[in-house]
Image: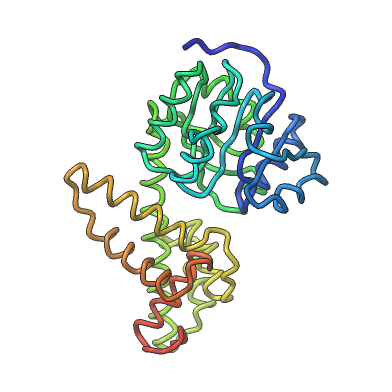
């Protein structure tokens, strides 16, 4: 497949939830013509004030698009919407680019790329890290798998969203995101354990967090999610149910390749327990509630 050098002017955004909505807004602000579609139409309608047009269905959203940015919730949803009967890929123009920024299994990323190639459509799997704040601020870490020349062609599209790194061939972006999710999930659990220990021992968790800023324990996770834990602010930026999706997917990939990842296995069990207790729609920093349940037998208070 040859990648044209034609200028990109029209972008379709499929999925305008916590991440996709702000990303669509930033692309419109950067001067692109943006058309959005979301399975829950109210979420897409709310973007009109940002200069984003809406479409009645996904196929209409993508017909004139130079780039179709997908930010849906999971691999199965991406498969159904993009490559299902009457899906998005079938409605896209030859020579356009499918940019899958959802967190999906490696196998799904490769399969979507193959389906796109059959219609002369380039495809990148380019998931992101940085959460809702990064989506709003345009500071996402973008990990792109696919052909290097396609990543280069989309550099102006990536610029309003964050920093892109080409990590390898198709599927590499999805794999890098799985590695990212294991680090994030285990770090969130470590922060939750540390603050739970501090509180049980009689220290003020807020002051403990303040004292550790700038030291070796400091990180973006510690700063942002540690603050959420201290403030008990669990409005979802990254819902726990999606954290379980990603850790479970990563562990399945590891088992397929003959790997044991014992820390990640325990982290996955902890998040799964949190979801089983009905907290799956809370932010993943709310895993501290599960730790406190384990240690009190109560309702999440130490």
Between 68 and 299, the residue placed more toward the observer is 68
Tell which residue pokes out farthest to the front in this image.
85
Residue 23 vs 67, above or below: the answer is below
Between 168 and 230, the residue placed more toward the observer is 168
Q: How is the image coloured?
A: rainbow
Between 99 and 59, the residue placed more toward the observer is 59
Residue 243: where, in percent of width, then height? 43, 58
Tell me the residue at 43%/27% (across/down): 113
Residue 191: where, in percent of width, then height? 42, 68
Residue 122 vs 42, above or below: the answer is above
Residue 158 vs 15, above or below: the answer is above
Residue 147: where, in percent of width, then height? 44, 21
On screen, residue 136 versus residue 212, left or right, reads right
Tell me the residue at 38%/46% (across/down): 178
On-image quarter of the C terminus: bottom left
Tell me the residue at 56%/24% (across/down): 97
Residue 93: where, in percent of width, then height? 61, 19
Quadrant position of residue 199: bottom left
């Amino acid at each position: 497949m040859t990648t044209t050098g034609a200028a990109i002017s029209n972008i379709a955004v499929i999925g305008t939830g916590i991440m996709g909505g702000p990303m669509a807004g930033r692309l419109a602000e950067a001067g692109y013509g943006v058309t959005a579609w979301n399975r829950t139409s109210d979420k897409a309608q709310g973007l009109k004030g940002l200069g984003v047009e809406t479409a009645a269905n996904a196929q209409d959203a993508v017909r004139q698009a130079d780039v179709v940015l997908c930010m849906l919730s999971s691999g199965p949803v991406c498969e159904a919407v993009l490559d299902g009967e009457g899906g998005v890929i079938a409605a896209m123009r030859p020579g356009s680019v499918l940019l899958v920024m959802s967190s999906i299994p490696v196998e799904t990323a490769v399969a979507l790329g193959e389906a796109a190639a059959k219609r002369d459509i380039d495809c990148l799997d380019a998931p992101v890290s940085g959460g809702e704040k990064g989506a709003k601020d345009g500071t996402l870490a973008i990990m792109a798998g696919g052909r290097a020349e396609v990543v280069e062609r989309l550099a102006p599209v990536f610029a309003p969203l964050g920093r892109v790194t080409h990590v390898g061939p198709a599927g590499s972006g999805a794999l890098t995101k799985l590695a990212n999710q294991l680090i994030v999930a285990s770090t969130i659990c470590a922060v939750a354990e540390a603050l739970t220990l501090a509180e049980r021992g009689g220290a003020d968790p807020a002051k403990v967090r303040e004292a550790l800023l700038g030291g070796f324990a400091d990180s973006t996770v510690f700063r942002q999610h540690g603050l959420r834990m201290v403030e008990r602010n669990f409005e979802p930026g990254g819902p726990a149910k999606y954290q379980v999706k990603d850790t479970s997917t990563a562990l399945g990939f590891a088992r397929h390749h003959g790997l044991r990842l014992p820390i990640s296995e325990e982290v996955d069990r902890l998040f799964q327990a949190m979801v089983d207790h009905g907290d799956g729609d809370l932010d993943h920093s709310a895993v501290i509630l599960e730790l406190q349940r384990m240690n009190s037998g109560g309702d999440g208070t130490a």
